[in-house]
Image (cartoon, rainbow, N blue to C red):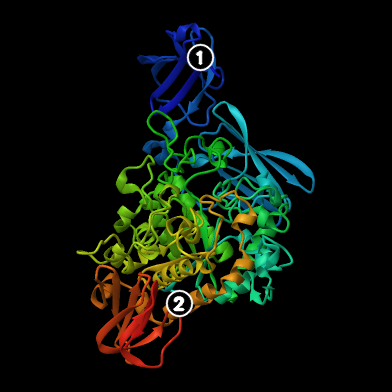
Amino acid sequence: MAMMYAYLDDFGHITVWLNRNFYNGSSNVFYLLGNDNECVKLIMSGVENHNNDIKYDLIAPADMKFGVDYHIREEHGLIEPLINRLIVQTEQFNKMFYYDGDDLGTTYHRHYTDFALWAPTACDVIVRITNNGEVVTYPLKREEKGVWRTSIGGDLKHATYVYLIKVNGTYVESIDPYALSLNGNSRESAIIDLEELESIPFVKCEEVKNIDSIIYETSIRDMTSSPFTNTSTNGKFKSLLQTGTKYQNIPTGIDYLTSLGVTHIQLLPVLDFYTVDEYHPEFNYNWGYDPVHYLSLEGSYSSNPSDPYTRMLEFRELVSFMHEKGLRVNLDVVFNHMYDVDSSCFNRTVPYYYYRYNNSGFLSNGSYCGNDFASNQPMARKYLVSVIEKLMKLYDVDGFRFDLMGIIDVDTMNEIRNKAVSIKKNAMIYGEGWDMPTQLDGRSKSCIVNQDLMEGIGHFNDYFRDTLKGKTSDDQKFDRGYGTGETSLAFGSLSALVANVMSDPLFMRFSEPVKSINGLETHDNGTVWDKMHFCCGNEDRELRKRRQKFMIAMTLVSQGIPFLHNGIEFAGSKNDNFNSYNAGDETNQMNWQRVQYNYDIVEYTRRIIKLRKKFKEFHLDTTEDIQKRVSVRTLEDTFIIYDIKSEEDDYKMIRVLFNPTLDFYNFHFDDEWKVIFDENGNEYDKMSYDINVPGVSLFVCMR
């Protein structure tokens, strides 16, 4: 531990902390040491006594320059580096160094490669290149806006590199934040010839409007890690390319995904993360919410993690293959934090710039991961927007789910959506809009209460989840929802059915239905089935299966965008593990034996998906349309009638009847209705004034 720390936190202001174990923390004189033996006596503007240290406020010379290796010396001869700290978060710094070019990273040419790194506080930058076993270093030259550049001759198509950056008094080694790919275990950045990727052409997939989407969340690893998947490889990008695989005549892998009828596959993080050894993924398991790099793909999903091209080609091939199968691909991106601040490429290239800090210099921790990415910083925002653009242009993905989106600022999310829809007009942008305690003012957070500031951006609707299923956290697993037996929540469920876009007497929280992402479970927390072990533990298995179907159907007939977590369609269980992020394959993988055992729920899910896709009434485009055409009401404070007027010629209205009780209930009407979906997904031939709905089920009717 150093006895003295010196920080440049603002223009004209240096802060020094001197430990009381060193001359009782007392110093009457401080000097600024620069290049070429420069020495300037500093003017002291204030002194504060603290328990273990004394704080000195010093006036910094007006002619100080960035890129100079400054040190502070106190009167007893102690010398420490002057650390560029919170000054990099000032408006003046951003005006001086904002770089609007699009050439950061490497640009490959057959006979040379250009290197460009934004590092305005660095004093020296060296690139170390490994090419065909030969290791060579080259200096970069500092140019305008704090960008360091060099151009190196030769064909570097398969070369890797790292930067050696002198910043705040010491050299650090860093991968390139702008690199398109990395080698095994994130050791080095890769130079990429983009023409190599063109060997895998894009496959055009018919675009689907966001409101017409049905999202299915799964993981590259989980979908095929079980040996019962019967793919030739397991847990890889290539594993999902294999067709014709079955377990007991049930399709597995990609064929299973295709058979469901969903429109979008949301993949858990496929971008580079830390806690899985890419060469030995069998030793570790992790969902991937521990990011190392925001742009490179995760090597453990590659058949050859040492080769930076392989992961790119295999993922590009997978997306094209999914498009060929009619499945669009959304990526779960973790742009709110990094696994480790000190070792991150962001903090090593420009320390203190890419993370949020409070006024005392401590990291903001709204993510509860020890750090929050400073998306509101201009170059950080520009970086995130460029990552979205590159992921779409490199791999042709269709949308993004943002982990802890409430950490990211509103302006950044709007810029991201604008960029995404300029590439694909129906690109999906949605995320977790929880109000996180990050160092942003309340109106700047991309959370649900600020949904009015973010056009077209979706939010996971926890009101929908908690009202229909019951509270989801581990300490609330005994709480019931409307679908798990708390029938008094009938009136509250009406708001959920209409995507929370209708007002008094209902609860309105969204300005447009596309903003409501309706799901009962995600990878987080326990599954619906596991929750019912607690809140419905006194009920037999068959009753709980009826509840599972009932809640799946409620999700698919509600306005907004339905979201299905893999396993909900076969009563998936994680053995009551409510946080399985590192619990291993056995807990998280697709359980094909359970799929077979509960195949009736799978078939039911397919039928209700097919029904939703057939009838536009379940996914109306606008709030105005819902307010004009939808009517919801309760009977006896328990049962629900949900009507949607039709604009078709061959029928006038769709009516959904909800019976959450354990007994049959007879709905009697003045008009005749035809059942088009019963408790098993079947359609009736005859019209009737009386619809007898079994307990814990819903019927869809039309006239």
Q: In this image, 95 relative to 690: left or right?
A: right
Disc 2 packing (10 Å; few <14; some 14–19; many ≥20) = many
Q: Residues within 10 Å of mark 1 (few under 14, many from 20)?
A: many
Give the number of the disc on residue 608: 2
295 vs 470, nearest the viewer: 470
What is the distance, in whole Å, between disc 1 and disc 2 at their CAs? 73 Å
Which residue is found at the position 69% from the left and 76% from the top? 244
Q: Dot 1 lies on which element?
A: strand
- Vertical order, 215 against 361 (above or below): below
The residue carrying mark 1 is: 73
| Figure disc tally | 2
In depth, the one of 298 and 489 nearer the eye is 489
Which amino acid type corresponds to the residue marked 2 in the rendered image?
Answer: Ile
Question: Which quadrant of the view contains residue 575?
Answer: bottom right
Per the image, label 2 sits on a secondary structure element best described as helix
The answer to whether residue 135 shows anywhere in this view is yes
Where residue 625 is drawn, which disc sits there?
none
Q: Nearer the viewer, residue 120 or 111?
A: 120
Residue at x 64%, y 55% (from the top left corner): 585
Image coords of residue 47 (percent x, y): 36, 14
194 left or right, relative to 27: right
Q: In this image, 684 relative to 229: left or right? A: left
Rendering coords of residue 337 (x, y %): 49, 44
Is residue 321 in view from this perspective?
A: no
The residue sitting at 29% across, 63% down in the picture is: 488
The answer to which image quadrant residue 221 occupies is bottom right
Q: Earlier in the sequence, mark 1 or mark 2?
A: 1
Q: Nearer the viewer, mark 1 or mark 2?
A: 2
